[in-house]
Amino acid sequence: MGYTLAMEKYDVGIVGGGIVGLATALTLKQRHPDLDLCVVETEGRVASHQTGRNSGVLHSGIYYKPGSSKANHCRLGKQFMEDFCDEHQVDWDRCGKVVVATHASEVERLDRIQE
């Protein structure tokens, strides 16, 4: 079974040219180089809808429980994005973040985040 678009046949069709659709397409091509795939986007260019309206911040997972799936996925995704930008000469800046405790009860949590 395949998909036909503009008289072309593809093995895989991906709907949406945002960050998730493009990351999916990239991963599929890396894992299966011979795969014929097509990304379909309704906007005039990729990443111009919701993806283009985010804060531009890569979340490092510091607010999730250390070692949790969410924290691990944030860290892994952040590393993938940094590696991708480096490989393709896309400028980026690790500007950092200041996280402070506003109550003495939050100090222990900051210690866990630091770990």
Image (cartoon, rainbow, N blue to C red):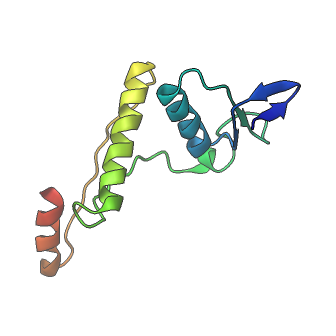
Residue 89 horizontal side relative to residue 63, left or right:
right
What residue is drawn where x is 30% and y is 64%? 63
- From this viewpoint, which residue is outermost toward the front? 1
Vertical placement of residue 70 versus 26, above or below: below
| Direction from residue 25 to residue 80 in the image, left or right | left
Residue at x 30% of width, y 53% of height: 72
Depth check: 88 or 24 in front?
24
Q: Quadrant of the N terminus?
A: top right
Residue 94: percent from left, percent from top: 32, 37
| Residue shown at 47% from the left, 29% from the top | 31
Q: Within the image, what quadrant is residue 70 found in?
A: bottom left
Residue 4 visible to an observer of this rendering: yes
Residue 10: image quadrant is top right
Q: Is residue 56 left or right of residue 68?
A: right
Residue 42: x and y, percent?
79, 42
Q: Position of residue 14 (x, y in %)?
A: 68, 40
Q: Is residue 38 above or below residue 48?
A: above
x%, y% of residue 32? Answer: 52, 27
Seen at 88% across and 25% down, the residue is 7
Depth check: 13 or 43 in front? 13
